[in-house]
Amino acid sequence: MLRRIGDRNPNPYCLCNNSCVDLERHKQLPTTVGVAHKRYSTHYEAAVRDGRLFARQQRYPHHRQFGLLNPRGLEMRKLLSFLLLLVSVHALPAAADVFTFPTSFKHQTIATNGAKIYVRVGGHGPAVVLLHGYGETGDMWAPIAAKLAANHTVVVPDLRGMGLSDHPATGYDKKNEARDIAGVLDALQIGKVDVVAHDIGNMVAYAFAAEQPERVTKLVLMDAPIPGVGPWEEILKSPLLWHFRFGGPDMERLVKGRERIYLDRFWNEFSADPKNFNEASRRHYAKLYALPGAMHSGFEQFHAFDQDAIDNKAFLAKGPLPMPVLAIGGEKSFGTMMATVASAAASNVQGVVIPNAGHWLMEEQPQATMSAITAFLQ
């Protein structure tokens, strides 16, 4: 690209593909084709500041032909920028489009229980809190949050150590995380709530409902087991759940910089059809899980399962949950097993199986999943 016959370029970081010698400057510049025009411009601006532009023009006259020194070249760069933007817009839906909450929602951080919890709040009416799981953040609830906000006050936190909440080193037993949620609700002056949860969110939701049953009016549990509850020991034998024991400093070093590879395994293997967990979502979540401390926090969620099982058995000994519970399973994932798990912890359970869905219910079959939830909460 843009190489003249006979030229050799000792500097692989220079897009002009000729003998540009400013190697160190180019190492600091972006490398994607989409900002090629910016790289040329930045290179020359740096040279001007150092007083070397004239000498470089004389030594490398081919630089002039790229249009940095003439009006026609400026128009060409504008056209190139527009074409690249057009291609990027049509190639992939933006994550902002996938995870857009209504503009009426307020986004804030609430300090509680030794952590800063990021939360989205909107709507009017009886309160409902939506708890996400591993591999996602509260952003997963954006589609249903918009629907529920018509007649509910909707509270959507990022769990401790995930998304835009902070990443403390400890505190990932689910009883403690349930106290994070209680603190958020207290700060918002919300008393009774419906709770809708998925994956690890189930475990936090159960601890919250078991510790403060008078506060939870209805509970929805989606496609994940609860440590120490029902057939937990049998569920642990599944080879698909090896990640429950994967963690520690060595594992964190292995995954560092490879977060997308690690997370793709979850999104692919736990989907009925991996294509339904779209590329925009994957990029969005992979970026969030690459934040400093995020993978450590994620591993700690699983590392706490043994303590969670101890805590939950103590809750079970006090009796079943009194509130109505909806247990939703993906047909290709937990299916009817979700009702079995919930029935071991609650006395008023109804089960729903979402056809043609794996674990990622809101991504794979959003309409069927949202219909089941909204019908139950009415």
Image: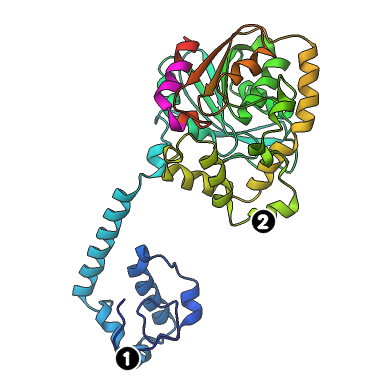
Q: Which residue is depicted at the point 64% across and 47% down? A: 295
Q: Which residue is depicted at the point 44% across and 76% down? A: 13
Q: 296 and 114: which one is in front?
A: 296
Answer whether residue 349 is visible to the viewer in this image: yes
- The residue labelled by disc 2 is 254
**Dominant secondary-structure state across the stretch colored magenta:** helix
| Residue 365 lies in the magenta stretch | yes
Question: Sequence-wise, which precedes: disc 1 or disc 2?
Answer: 1
Q: Sort mark 1 into few (<14), some (14-19) or many (20+) by Cα contacts within 10 Å.
A: few
The quarter of the image holding the N terminus is bottom left
User: Real-space Cα distance between discs 1 and 2?
Assistant: 44 Å
- Where residue 369 appears, as percent x and y from the top left, is 45, 22
Checking the image for residue 6, the label placed there is 1
Q: In this view, does 364 lie above or below 126?
A: below
- Where residue 60 appears, as percent x and y from the top left, is 34, 89
Q: Which amino acid does label 1 sit on?
A: Gly
